Amino acid sequence: MCFMYRHNPQDGSSKQLKHCESSAEENKYNFQEEKPLTMGFGRKVYSVHNHVGVLDPWPFYESEEPISPADPGPATSEELTRFMESRGMEKCLIIPNYGIPVQEQPFKLNELVVQLCREGNGRVAGALWVSGLPQNRELTEKALTMLDEPGIRGLKMSYLLGGTPDPRKWDEATLKLHEKIFSEARERNIPIHFHTSPGGNSDITNYFELIKRYGKDLKIHLVHMGGGVSGHIRLISQWRDLIEGGYQVYIDSSWAIGFAVRKLLKELDQTGIGVDRFLFGCDEPWSDYEGEFWKIQGAPISDEIKERVFWGNAEEQYFSKLA
């Protein structure tokens, strides 16, 4: 049961919009009705960025009523299997679905991630949601206790719900919690997936100090390749220095703009610098598999590089260690 509110910035008031009794039922999606996307069949593909679970409807932006802008993510092993098979996806790494301004929401899906990994027969790895915000300390500590569950191979953090990745701006409590998260990841040699997007807290410029301080012994996966035109340009311009400087930076090209994907892939093909750091991710249900697939498949690069991006790097990073 939940009550949705829309804040009115003009007068500071909040309006009750709708009583939601069972969002999972209202937001039902039939994965069995999905038609196979045959464009990827014949190409071995592992996706390291896929969201699972249902989001409650929310009054986004100017909406007067709660809406569900994207289809729900798979919420059972049967749905996840159908999701993968209809795309020709052999293995995937799953992450809690998120997108509404409720701190507790993605934490509630960590147990679903664990369950789907247990039932995944070596085809499913997972990343658990954690937060560096002190207000989420207990939720994060609970999530960290699940790190040794079968199939858990990463952590996921986003600053869209508050905070900053820039350690120069952390207070003592925030620093302590971040370093606890980082220590747990280092101990297990697993990456942390950080959301990037242009402007605001998640802008790539806020991550460079974090990379400088922690990136030589912590695997930092920058989701969306730095985020937007400005983020792509800034990240690509520093790519060679970061890799040759010993920083453990990884990326996926989900939501990335075509020019940047082509440019970096061609550089990898020509120089080999960071060839093991670029992974394929489709970011469904928020993006679309077809577009994400074709950004790699249609790139003017060698098939050897495509194989590394589509599955080889993911196998080394995530799946070779699964039982």
Image (spheres, grey):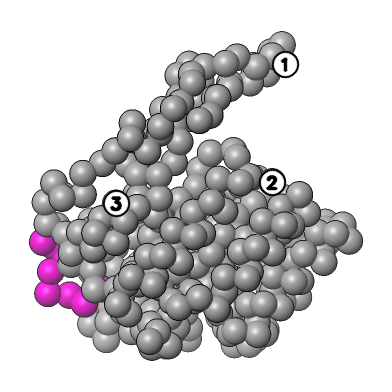
Taking the spot 48% from the left edge, 18% from the top edge, the residue there is: 18
Question: Nearer the viewer's eye, disc 3 or disc 1?
Answer: 1
Q: Secondary structure at mark 2?
A: loop
Q: Quadrant of the C terminus?
A: bottom left
First reached walking from the N terminus: tag 3 or tag 1: 1
Q: Residues within 10 Å of mark 3 (few under 14, many from 20)?
A: few
Q: Secondary structure at mark 3?
A: loop
From the top left corner, tell me how far across and down residue 219 is, in percent: 59, 78
Q: Which mark is residue 162?
A: 2
Gap in angstroms between the C-alphas marked 2 and 3: 27 Å
The residue type indicated by label 2 comes to Gly
| Residue under label 3 | 288
Was residue 281 drawn as part of the magenta stretch in this picture?
no
Do the residues bearing badges 2 and 1 touch, measured as CB atoms within 8 Å?
no
From the top left corner, tell me how far across and down residue 21 is, in percent: 44, 27
Q: Which mark is residue 4?
A: none
First reached walking from the N terminus: tag 2 or tag 1: 1
Q: From the viewer's side, name the closer residue of 312 and 264.
A: 312
Quarter-of-image position of residue 214: bottom right
The mark total stands at 3
| Residue under label 1 | 12
* Residue 169 in sight here: yes
First reached walking from the N terminus: tag 2 or tag 3: 2
Q: Residues within 10 Å of mark 1 (few under 14, many from 20)?
A: few
Please determine whether, in this image, residue 323 is positioned above or below residue 117. below
Query: Which residue is the extreme one toward the top?
Result: 11
Give the residues in magenta. Answer: 38-45
Taking the spot 74% from the left edge, 57% from the top edge, the residue there is: 137
Position of 41 with respect to 133 (left or right) is left
Gap in angstroms between the C-alphas marked 2 and 1: 20 Å
Quarter-of-image position of residue 174: bottom right
